[in-house]
Every structure is written in C-alpha cells, then in structure tokens.
Image (tube, rainbow, N blue to C red):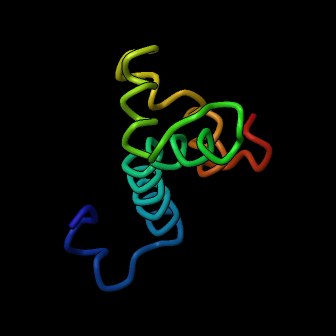
Amino acid sequence: MLLPKAHQDKPTSIEVFGTSSLASLLAVSACYPLILAKARRQSGRFRYDNILAAMRSIVRRNGALGLFAGWQSRASTLLGGADGR
C-alpha cells in the first residue's frame, strides 16, 4: 500500500528497508507505554499493583507524554543506530 503500483511486485531494497523501518517504528510506538510500565513494575523501584495502575501513575506524574519517556533511544535503534545515537 505504501509503495507505488509499479514497485509492489518487486520492491527495491531501499523501499523494503524504508517500509520495514516505518512498520517497526509504528509497532514500537504502539507498544512502548506497555513496555515502559512493565519495566518500571519489574524494577522494584516503583510499587504498582498491575500494569494499568503503573500507566495511570505515570500519566498522573508526568502527563501522557510520560508514557513515552525513553522512546527516542528505542526508536533510533530501529532507524539505524545500534547503540541509540
């Protein structure tokens, strides 16, 4: 769908890389709040009863964007920087 009709049967390697990077970025963006809440819960530093309670607490303290704290470093690894730079 993202590729022109002429390239859908045999996309170039650049097109494959671009579309798979975009798909990975969207998947990480959708799941990142759950990953963050799970990691905070498992760290032992924070006390939450469940993941939903963790997400509510993060939003209460840091706003909705707090659910994406650290997202930039994860997203940059998907776009080519293995170490997040």
> Is 51 on the left or on the right of 9, as rendered?
right
Nearest the camera: 14 or 70?
A: 70
Q: Quadrant of residue 15?
A: bottom left
Judge left or right: residue 43 versus residue 37: right
Taking 11 as reference, is 63 above or below it?
Answer: above
Q: Residue furthest right?
A: 83
User: Picture coordinates of residue 26 (x, y %)?
Assistant: 38, 51
Query: Image point 46% across, 64% down: which residue?
Result: 20
Residue at x 31% of width, y 74% of height: 7
Q: Identify the residue at horizontal 46%, vertical 36% (top origin).
A: 54
Task: List x then y, in percent, for residue 35.
Answer: 53, 49
Q: Is residue 9 above or below residue 50?
A: below
Report the quarter where the C terminus lies. Answer: top right
Measured as percent of width and height from the top left, residue 1 is found at: 21, 67
Question: Residue 82: x and y, percent?
Answer: 76, 50
Q: Is residue 36 above or below residue 1?
A: above
Is residue 43 toward the left or the right of residue 63 in the image?
right
Give the vertical position of 68 relative to 76 (above or below): above
The total of numbered circles placed on residues is 0
Name the residue rendered at 38%, 83% in the picture: 10
Residue closer to the observer: 24 or 46: 46
**Nearest the camera: 42 or 19?**
42
> Camera-side residue: 27 or 47?
47
Residue at the bottom extreme, as displayed: 9
* Picture quadrant where residue 45 is located: top right
